[in-house]
């Protein structure tokens, strides 16, 4: 097969691109081509003639005489053999030629015996098709005159295609010029207008006829005409301009004498008539007006009308330049993202506007209130470096936000976190002062809602350390240094392993195995919580599948959730997709939630939990009893397991209060039909007390520290379990 017929060759790719450029395949009827095909049939005295174009897999019979066939598979046609030729292909008897005798087209109707075809060749030498004649009876070779006739007709086909393409382009350009909203104007070598489009007429108030052949100065304000005419004369004489391709803003004059600001882009070209000059015109009246408004709004937030970050920084800088004192308070709204996500940005924007109004009303008039972006606001206190005034101002703001906001017939309780910094104590310029306040705000957010923190240098160093650890954690995730260890959960009555909690560890290349206490706070304040949470879930499910594969007795594996996974809105989808990917039953997975997660869930957020519970995934409430979670909190969630925090277990043998609280939690779990797991069991005495109190399952160093999956595999060996039970009871 020749290179041209090799569908993957560069020559074939270029040939098809040339064909596509004509837009002839699959288009409508072309009467002029039909005339040429008919002329070919008459000139060579054949029954049939066709003009075909051949793409990657189809032969398109664009014009036909005596034929009804419109398309053929490329390999079923005769004409594909013309693609590699420069001269005519003549086949006196198709039935006796092995190249054609077996083609399906030879066995249908009409019958073909004679074929002669010449290539249709572009100016670049690409053969895009053929002009052919066919007959039902064999014939001898074509004469020189007949071949010349076919070639001449083929040249007529290509001339038609080239003219068709040129006409199509001119028509397309004209249609574009009339459809575009940009004004277009062209002038000749004498400086007279020879073309304008509809947009130019609409812009300047003339008709096209009124502008045609007029000097271009009719659209130039009179006071500028002298200078414009001189400049245009130089351009036309030299054929060059420094403004060629450049965009400038000028004034144009309308037909009624009024002026309009336009953006003008000049273009020059050269042809047989000399230098041509054209321009695109755009009305910039609205932009000019908008620019003026933007200048007014440059220092204000468009949603709330408060000062923006730029204005705030300018005010701080002005105060610093005058050697005054200053303070800045940063305010972050707690859980605003949840409002936006659950109720939409419209309600969120209304809430931000209400916050701005209340914030402004809660501080003196000479204080500057600003919105820095999102749900972060600021208060600038000029001529003040007194921490007591800053603290009292922050307290007033907190007090003002104790009242709920009523938006869209709903009540919203908005908590605040506040950070503050003083000049010159904490910062040497506006940016540094704001950064220090941001460090303080970050600390306030970490310590819980409703907290006020004033900057201290330790906050900066702690933030730097946290950022460094976050960068290390990112690399740890990429290098697969994060691993899971598993701590067994034991049925106290039998010593049998009935579950395991998956716990994150960092296999640090220098420091060795690191527990989460060293890096969890840095992780939870970064954007890594989602990918790390996804890794933990995926790895735990992968390991469950591996345990199932080797035939270990089935047991439940607990996985701790990050708050960010719950806030993402994709928790249910993510968990179910992971289970499905590893072919793990949902009943084998237990997701552990903390009080922080539980206390910040609304009805929308709870849908993910209920969806997973319906699928078979169970939920455990971790560290129960250590915070503010109440019975009503537990009842809102589809909880299956309560995990009693180790702080109650540690002193249960010597602290009557701890024992009483533990007894109450176990009883509550039993009454609610929940499994209760006591964490942190280290001694036989603690185990015995918990069993007397009715606790069924335990977890702690008495039964094993968190270990790699391989160790759990060994522990679950039936013989090992029997030995462990004997050792505990013997």
Image (cartoon, rainbow, N blue to C red):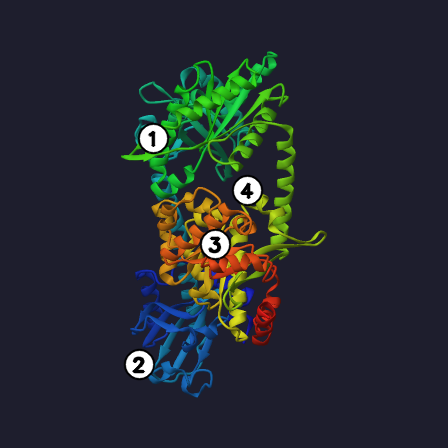
Reading the image, the residue beneath label 3 is: 643
Reading the image, the residue beneath label 1 is: 405
Q: CA distance from mark 3 to mark 2?
A: 86 Å
Q: Position of residue 114 (x, y in %)?
A: 39, 81
Q: Image quarter for residue 577?
A: bottom left
In front: label 3 or label 1: 3
Question: Which tag, 4 or 3, sits closer to the chain's start?
Answer: 4
Residue 488's place in the image compared with 430, above or below, is below
Q: Residues within 10 Å of mark 3 (few under 14, many from 20)?
A: many
Q: Residues within 10 Å of mark 1 (few under 14, many from 20)?
A: some
Closer to the camera in the image, 98 or 296: 296
Q: Tell me the SS state at disc 3.
A: strand
Residue at (52% x, 53% y) in the render:
533
In front: label 3 or label 2: 3
Question: Which tag, 3 or 2, sits closer to the chain's start?
Answer: 2
Is disc 3 in contact with disc 1, using a CB cutoff of under 8 Å?
no
Q: CA distance from mark 4 to mark 2?
A: 79 Å
Specify the label residue 110 is tagged with. Answer: 2
Q: Tell me the SS state at disc 2.
A: loop
Q: Quadrant of the C terminus?
A: bottom right
Side of 462 where 695 appears, left or right: left
Q: CA distance from mark 3 to mark 1?
A: 36 Å
Q: Residue furthest bottom?
A: 96
Q: Position of residue 206 (x, y in %)?
A: 31, 27
Q: Position of residue 160 (x, y in %)?
A: 39, 58
Q: Residues within 10 Å of mark 4 (few under 14, many from 20)?
A: some
Question: Which tag, 3 or 1, sits closer to the chain's start?
Answer: 1
Q: Position of residue 580 (x, y in %)?
A: 44, 65
Q: Tell me the SS state at disc 4.
A: loop
């Amino acid at each position: 097969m020749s290179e041209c017929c090799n569908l993957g060759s560069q020559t074939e790719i270029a040939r098809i691109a040339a064909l596509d450029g004509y837009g002839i395949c699959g288009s409508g009827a072309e009467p002029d081509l039909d005339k040429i095909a008919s002329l070919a049939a008459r000139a060579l005295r054949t029954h049939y003639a066709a003009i075909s174009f051949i793409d990657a897999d189809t032969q398109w019979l664009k014009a036909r005489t005596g034929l009804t066939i419109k398309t053929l598979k490329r390999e079923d046609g005769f004409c594909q053999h013309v693609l590699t030729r420069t001269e005519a292909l003549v086949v006196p008897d198709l039935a006796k030629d092995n190249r054609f005798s077996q083609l399906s087209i030879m066995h249908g109707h009409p019958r073909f015996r004679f074929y002669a075809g010449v290539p249709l060749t572009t100016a670049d030498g690409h053969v895009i098709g053929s002009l052919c004649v066919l007959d039902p009876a064999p014939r001898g070779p074509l004469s020189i005159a007949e071949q010349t006739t076919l070639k001449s007709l083929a040249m007529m086909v290509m001339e038609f295609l080239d003219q068709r393409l040129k006409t199509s382009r001119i028509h397309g350009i004209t249609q574009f010029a009339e459809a575009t909203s940009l004004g277009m104007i062209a002038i000749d070598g004498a400086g007279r207008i020879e073309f304008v489009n509809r947009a130019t007429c609409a812009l300047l108030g003339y008709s096209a006829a009124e502008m045609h052949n007029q000097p271009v100065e009719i659209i130039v304000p009179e006071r500028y005409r002298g200078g414009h005419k001189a400049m245009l004369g130089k351009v036309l004489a030299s054929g060059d301009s420094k403004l060629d391709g450049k965009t400038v803003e000028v004034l144009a004059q309308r037909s009624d004498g009024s002026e309009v600001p336009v953006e003008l882009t000049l273009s020059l070209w050269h042809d047989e008539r000399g230098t041509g000059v054209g321009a695109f015109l755009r009305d910039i009246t609205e932009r000019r007006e908008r620019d003026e408004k933007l200048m007014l709004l440059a220092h204000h937030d468009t949603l709330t009308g408060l000062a923006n970050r730029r204005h705030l920084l300018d005010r701080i800088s002005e105060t610093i330049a005058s050697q005054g004192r200053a303070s800045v308070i940063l305010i972050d709204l707690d859980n605003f993202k949840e409002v936006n996500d659950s109720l939409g940005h419209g309600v969120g924007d209304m809430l931000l506007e209400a916050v701005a109004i209340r914030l402004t009303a809660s501080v003196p008039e000479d204080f500057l209130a600003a919105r820095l972006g999102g749900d972060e606001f600021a208060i600038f206190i000029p001529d003040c470096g007194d921490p007591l005034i800053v603290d009292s101002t922050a307290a007033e703001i907190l007090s003002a936000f104790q009242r709920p906001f009523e938006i869209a017939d709903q009540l919203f309780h908005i908590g605040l976190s506040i950070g503050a910094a003083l000049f010159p104590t904490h910062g040497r310029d506006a940016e540094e002062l704001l950064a220090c306040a941001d460090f303080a705000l970050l600390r306030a957010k970490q310590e819980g809602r409703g907290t006020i923190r004033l900057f201290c240098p330790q906050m900066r160093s702690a933030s730097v350390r946290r950022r460094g650890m976050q960068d290390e954690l990112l690399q740890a995730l990429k290098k697969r240094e994060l691993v899971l260890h598993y701590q067994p959960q034991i049925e106290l009555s039998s010593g049998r392993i009935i579950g395991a909690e998956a716990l994150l560890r960092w296999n640090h290349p220098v420091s060795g195995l690191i527990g989460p206490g060293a890096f969890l706070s840095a992780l939870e304040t970064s954007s890594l919580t989602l990918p790390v949470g996804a890794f933990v879930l995926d790895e735990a499910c992968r390991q469950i599948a591996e345990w199932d594969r080797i035939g270990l007795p089935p047991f439940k594996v607990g996985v701790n959730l990050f708050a960010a996974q719950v806030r993402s809105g994709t928790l249910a989808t993510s968990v179910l997709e992971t289970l499905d990917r590893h072919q793990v039953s949902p009943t084998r997975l237990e997701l552990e939630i903390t009080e922080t997660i539980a206390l910040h869930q609304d009805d929308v957020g709870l849908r993910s939990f209920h969806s997973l519970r319906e699928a078979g995934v169970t939920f455990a409430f971790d560290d129960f009893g250590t915070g503010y979670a109440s019975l009503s909190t537990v009842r809102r969630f589809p909880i299956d397991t309560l995990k009693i925090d180790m702080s109650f277990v540690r002193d249960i043998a010597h602290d009557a209060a701890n024992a009483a609280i533990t007894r109450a939690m176990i009883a509550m779990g039993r009454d609610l039909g929940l499994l209760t797991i006591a964490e942190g069991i280290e001694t036989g005495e603690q185990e015995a007390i918990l069993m007397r109190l009715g606790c069924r399952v335990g977890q702690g160093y008495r039964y094993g520290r968190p270990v790699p999956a391989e160790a759990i595999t060994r522990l679950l060996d039936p013989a090992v379990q029997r030995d462990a039970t004997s050792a505990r009871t013997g």
